[in-house]
Image: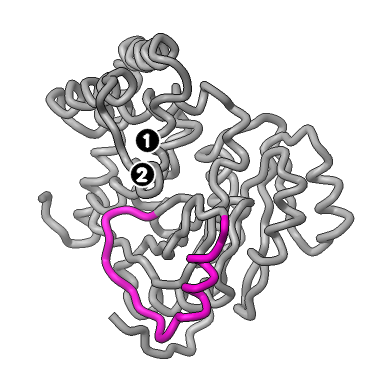
């Protein structure tokens, strides 16, 4: 669908999440901030970095609001800090950006245009080039971009996530029990179930990917497996839960199972090492979910209640 013009200029809060990413900020922050859109507030949420990220920001970007945290709150917790700040300051939209992305400079303008013309689209994403380290495809997409178009989708990548702040008032914030991975999937699922819709603009965004989380080592794989199961435990039924457990064990341990690392790079997290290590991580992920079963189910009930209230307020029936 082609984007028409619009003169509306609601305020946007651009939230960049950072953890020990001083070099990434130096490389990517100028591109992230390169936009003519106004009114815009640029905020960096720093997850208790131990490098000189905060000092560098204060010295080189004095107009950026830095929200320095005392502990690493992960992707979900750090972005919740940004979301609450955006709501407190009265911004209509908030754009969550990883510190390792390079977006097309029209990304904010076109996202606001779509969100203003189609207010039911509370979540908007972009055409992400993930792990394309030679940048050729991204650069070709930027050079060959014609008219700005969009399409309806069911999920948006969390590295560049544009949201109406009303989302958080209706379906809640990011679930901080995930820490990393699947947290945006959970949030987007709740939003869509609550009657909101999601769209993707054809504006390119290059994502270096794993630049901050790669240092987690095997914990990346553990969190991916653990959270895949937790999502089904929380918002699916028992059949979906057992299916998720089976899938995690198969992807971690089945010797003949293969996938395309170019189109599904996240699946590589299931096999970070040799078979015994992968199996141990998968079993640890299952064990964590068994131990926290009651807590997770309780969170799921609370989310389903919010979803029902959101649907009722938006005049939609339960699917």
Does 126 appear in magenta?
no
- Which residue in the structure is indicated by mark 2? 264
How crowded pointer 2 is (Cα within 10 Å; few <14, some 14-19, many 20+) is rated as few
Up the image or down, 208 lies above or below 112; here it is above
* Residue found at x 75% / y 60%: 64
Between 291 and 170, the one nearer to me in the picture: 291
Up the image or down, 234 lies above or below 15; here it is above
By what rule are the colours in the image chosen? Answer: one colour
Name the image quarter holding residue 225. Answer: top left
Between 221 and 198, the one nearer to me in the picture: 221
| Spot occupied by residue 62 in the image (x, y as percentages of width and height) | 84, 61
Residue farthest to the right?
A: 59
Between 167 and 24, the one nearer to me in the picture: 24
Direction from residue 238 to residue 76 in the image, left or right: right
* Residue found at x 18% / y 21%: 242
Up the image or down, 48 lies above or below 200; here it is above
Range of the magenta residues? 134-156
- Which residue in the structure is indicated by mark 1? 267
| Spot occupied by residue 251 in the image (x, y as percentages of width and height) | 29, 26
The answer to whether residue 288 of the structure is visible from this angle is no
How crowded pointer 1 is (Cα within 10 Å; few <14, some 14-19, many 20+) is rated as some
Label 2 secondary element: loop
Direction from residue 268 to residue 312 in the image, left or right: left
Label 1 secondary element: helix
Does 149 appear in magenta?
yes
The answer to whether residue 223 of the structure is visible from this angle is yes
């Amino acid at each position: 669908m082609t984007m028409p013009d619009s003169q509306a200029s609601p305020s946007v809060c651009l939230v960049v999440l950072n953890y020990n990413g001083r070099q990434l900020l130096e490389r990517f922050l100028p591109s992230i901030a390169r936009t003519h859109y106004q009114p815009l507030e640029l905020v960096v949420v720093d997850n208790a970095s131990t490098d000189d990220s905060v000092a560098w920001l204060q010295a080189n970007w004095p107009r950026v609001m830095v929200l320095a945290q005392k502990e690493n709150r992960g992707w979900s917790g750090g972005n919740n800090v940004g979301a609450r700040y955006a709501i407190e300051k009265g911004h209509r939209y908030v754009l969550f950006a990883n510190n390792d992305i390079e977006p097309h400079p029209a990304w904010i303008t076109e996202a606001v245009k779509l969100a203003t013309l189609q207010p039911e689209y509370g979540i908007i994403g972009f055409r992400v080039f993930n792990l394309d380290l030679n940048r050729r495809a991204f650069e070709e997409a930027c050079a060959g971009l014609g008219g700005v178009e969009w399409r309806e989708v069911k999920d948006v990548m969390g590295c560049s996530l544009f949201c109406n702040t009303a989302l958080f008032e209706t379906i809640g914030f990011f679930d901080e029990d995930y820490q990393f991975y699947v947290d945006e999937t959970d949030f987007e699922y709740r939003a869509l179930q609550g009657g909101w819709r999601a769209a993707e603009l054809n504006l390119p965004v290059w994502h270096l990917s794993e630049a901050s989380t790669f240092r987690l080592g095997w914990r990346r794989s553990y969190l991916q497996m653990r959270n895949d199961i937790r999502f089904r435990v929380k918002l699916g039924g028992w059949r979906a839960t057992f299916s998720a457990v089976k899938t995690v064990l198969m992807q971690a341990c089945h010797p003949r199972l293969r996938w395309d690392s170019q189109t599904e790079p996240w699946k590589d997290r299931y096999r970070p090492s040799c078979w015994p290590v992968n199996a141990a991580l998968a079993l640890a992920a299952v064990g964590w979910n068994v131990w926290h079963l009651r807590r997770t189910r309780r969170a799921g009930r609370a989310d389903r209640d919010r979803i029902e209230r959101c649907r009722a307020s938006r005049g939609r029936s339960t699917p």
